Amino acid sequence: MTAFTYTHSPSLGPLTTQSPQTLSATSNPPIDYLMTSVMVLRQPQPHSQNTKNHQPQILLLRRHPQDSYPLKWEPPGGSIDPSDTTVLSAAARELHEETNLSNPHFHTWVAMARELPTEDAARMKNWGVLPEEELARDVEVKIDEEGGVVRVTTFLETKDVWGKMNLVATVGEGAEVEIDPEEHVEWGWFTEGEVRRGRAVLPLENGNSNGVNGEKGERVLEFTSRAVWGSVLEAFRVGRELGVIA
């Protein structure tokens, strides 16, 4: 089995020894299916090309039209496999499988945004899961004997409790994204303003050069769920707070 390497901040140390099964069982309510979501942030440098005014950006992928939640946008991530020994190793594996990015540094976890901006939310439409059906909430899960906790976003689907561990990460400068065309059709680096507005201009080399449904360069960012959108916004806030982005 391939070992997917990563580094992490000291605050995430307990997650390197605790199994995903223990984390799921410790949650209240217990989590039936645990997933990871990797919020990859970057701060474009003045000398770099294809930047958007050098504003901080986050990596998002667009789901395949034949998959569930077709053509919706989301961060890299996915279900934790039985072979994954920790949440962090699962996140590193999913990031590599979906984007070909390796050796991430995990800075911290994030939950949903504390307060979702009402005006921005009113502009967002066509969620993959309707907010009233998602029933998403954050729960605290103990990760060590000293009282350390993480917050996991939980939601119900077919009466099962799903949990998503959202992790803020960075990768080496110059790392190139390569998506799996069977899972995602496009990718892009987006600013917080674009995420809030739900609209962006995507360079045509990022996936399908002909666009999808004749969209050309402009994209309407429709997310898999309101909880995912809120977590992406929270990643920007936490990233600035930690100095990961400016």
Image (spheres, rainbow, N blue to C red):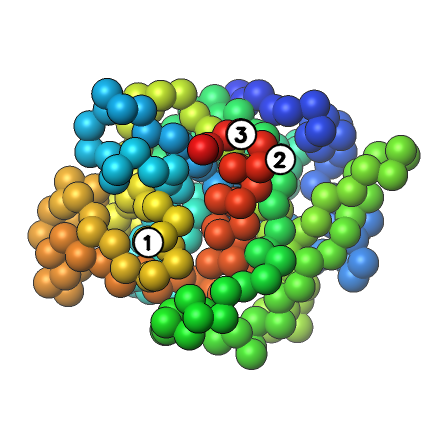
Which residue carries the number 2 mark? 108
Snapshot quadrant of residue 223: bottom left
Residue 194 marker: 1
Sequence-first tag of 2 and 3 = 2
Q: Amino acid at mark 3?
A: Gly
Q: Is residue 190 above or below residue 116?
A: above
Q: Amino acid at mark 1?
A: Glu
> Do the residues under discs 3 and 1 have CB atoms within 8 angstroms?
no
Horizontal relation, residue 174 to residue 192: left or right: left
Residue sitting nearer the eye, 89 or 146: 146
Looking at the rendering, which quadrant does residue 98 occupy?
top left
Question: Looking at the picture, does residue 231 appear above or below residue 11?
Answer: below
Between 147 and 37, the one nearer to me in the picture: 147
Considering only order in the chain, which callout, 1 or 2, is on the residue closer to the N terminus? 2
Q: Is residue 76 visible?
A: yes
Q: Residue at x 62, y 51 (%)?
A: 111
Asked if the residues shown at circle 2 and circle 1 are in contact, with their CB atoms under 8 angstroms apart, the answer is no
Name the N-terminal-most of marks 3 and 1.
Answer: 1
What residue lies at 14% left-to-right and 45% top-to-bottom? Answer: 204
Mark 3 secondary-structure assignment: loop
**Residue 159 shows which numbered tag?**
none
Q: Position of residue 134 (x, y in %)?
A: 57, 71
Element type where label 1 sits in the image:
helix
How many C-alpha atoms fall within 10 Å of the one at disc 3: few (<14), some, or many (≥20)? Answer: few
Judged by depth in the image, the label closer to the viewer, 2 or 1, is: 1
Q: What SS does tag 2 mark? A: strand
Kind of residue indicated by mark 2: Thr
Q: How far, Cα to Cα, is label 2 from label 1? A: 23 Å
The numbered disc on residue 243 is 3
Which residue appears at 24% of the width and 34% of the height?
A: 51
**Residue at far right of view:** 145
